[in-house]
Image (cartoon, grey):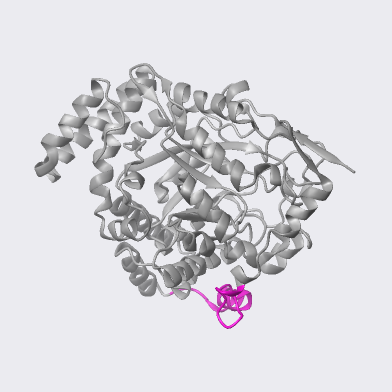
Amino acid sequence: MTTVVCNHCEHTTARVADWVKNRIKPEQIEKYLDHGRCFIDTAAIEQALKANGKPDPRRVRDILQKSLAIETLTPEETVCLIHVEDPELLAEMRQAAQAVKVRVYDNRIVTFAPLYLGNLCVNNCAYCGFRSSNHSEQRRVLSLDEVRREIEVLAGQIGHKRLIVVYGEHPATDVHYIASTLRTIADVKVKTRCGWGQIRRCNVNAAPMSVEELAVLNEAGIGTFQVFQETYHRPTYERLHPAGTIKGNYLWRLYAMHRAMEAGIDDVGIGPLLGLYDWRFEVMALVYHAIELEKKFGIGPHTISFPRIEPAHNTPLAQHPEYAVDDDEFKKLVTVIRLAVPYTGMILTARENARLRREVLPLGCTQTDASSRIGIGAYADLADGDQQGDRQQFLLGDTRSLDTVVRELAEAGCITSFCTAGYRCGRTGQKIMGLLRSGKEGRFCKLNAVITFREWLDDFGSPETIAAGEKVIAEEIRQVREKMPEIFDQFMRYYDKTQAGDRDLYF
């Protein structure tokens, strides 16, 4: 009998097989089907993509006005934008996407870091460096002490306040391990230059779970629960995810967000892995997914991600994806997503290189990572920019430091927000969706962005970044004085206290 040993936990092949066998709960899929059918109609999407010819410019401009009113587009409206090729209309779409982002989120960019806590996985996805058949991967699951050491770097040296924690699907990283790591992360406080550092929000990227397990995560204090469908195109999905594995069940994954919301997790994140199938199909399916969540639960996805497949160690399919998305297509699809689901947060990751991130962020993105190290245990034992392919899921395109990225954003007139206040004030789920659609959430966020940016600059900023950041802060303070005079004095009291060393003040 084979035994997998990882950080003092033993998992025999038989035990792992039993765990896999009991993961999927068919009744937790069937309850959400509409007369036995799922909300992704592959044939209908493909037909719509084929049938929609050259769009009427007047029709396109009417659709853009709907986006600017922060209304979710229909699939028919989305496919119209997908088919736009006229340079003048594309330029108008980009301008509208930028305007939508500013209307909902102002000039803020939220930063975070990915933290991979284990790379054991029972699945065998053809494109993934963590797949079970990749025997050249260094397998490891972090102990709680090792998790603390990672957080000491992330919160005490780099200055992150928000994480996306990532886990393979394996009994060694089951829901109880995830809950334990979330509690451990929340408990770490580190002395900084002027105050103290702490992770204040933990989003989770993990495998689909049952309602009962998701309730455990919710109780542990999860932020956004993120599950990517990888590809919504079912024939491709089934080809890339072997039958008999947990991930081979298309519907179990497709309805992961339904179960999360049923369990009380009201902020969820969705996305495809671009390159597995035609990006046009994936964008259409994303819109169907957003509409489905709005229909069933009254709220759509809190975030949408759009990662492109990147090279992975000993993984040929990732080196040469069949449906590779070029840079121009990537910019277009980001624009269309912003217009189609105008309220959602949009996450641009360090998979992309620095040049492309500079070009894509203004098209409507709201979040990005920096100082990212995605090898297991890499924050504690690797320097910024170092990568080891056999201990990470894929290779990154941008490994610049958080300080560098913050400075670049400031020079572009953007404020980096480290705010996590809304989640702790109950501005989640339906509450935040209403605020986002009305533009009111931006009032809270502008105030808290300035305060947390001041905090980060004082605790972690280099002299060059502090100089660039303070120019942005001066303009933000001017806007608060002019647009929110009724709260300006209280805002300045919080700001002055933060400069004096107080931490975690928010509206």
Residue at horizontal 28 percent and vertical 57 percent from the top: 435
User: Is residue 411 shown left or right of residue 17?
Assistant: left
Q: Quadrant of residue 396?
A: top right
Placement of the C terminus among the 4 image quadrants: top left
Q: Nearer the viewer, residue 114 or 169?
A: 169
Placement of the N terminus among the 4 image quadrants: top right
Q: Nearer the viewer, residue 88 or 344?
A: 344
Q: Nearer the viewer, residue 259 or 250?
A: 259
Reply yes or no: does residue 361 show up in magenta.
no
Residue at horizontal 81 percent and vertical 36 percent from the top: 136
Q: Residue furthest bottom?
A: 35
Reply yes or no: does residue 42 show up in magenta.
yes
The residue range painted magenta reads 30-55
Residue at horizontal 61 percent and vertical 59 percent from the top: 229
Residue 128 % position (x, y): 71, 47
- Seen in the picture, residue 240 relative to 115 is either above or below; the reply is below
| Residue 305 in sight in this render | no
- Seen in the picture, residue 349 relative to 270 is either above or below; the reply is above
Residue 173 % position (x, y): 65, 43
Please tell me how many numbered marks the rendered image carries: 0
Q: Quadrant of residue 397?
A: top right
User: Is residue 289 shown left or right of residue 104?
Assistant: right
Q: Quadrant of residue 211?
A: bottom right
User: Is residue 164 shown left or right of residue 321?
Assistant: left
Residue 263 % position (x, y): 49, 59
Residue 503 % position (x, y): 30, 27
- Seen in the picture, residue 37 relative to 224 is either above or below; the reply is below
Q: Residue furthest right?
A: 1
| Residue 451 in sight in this render | yes
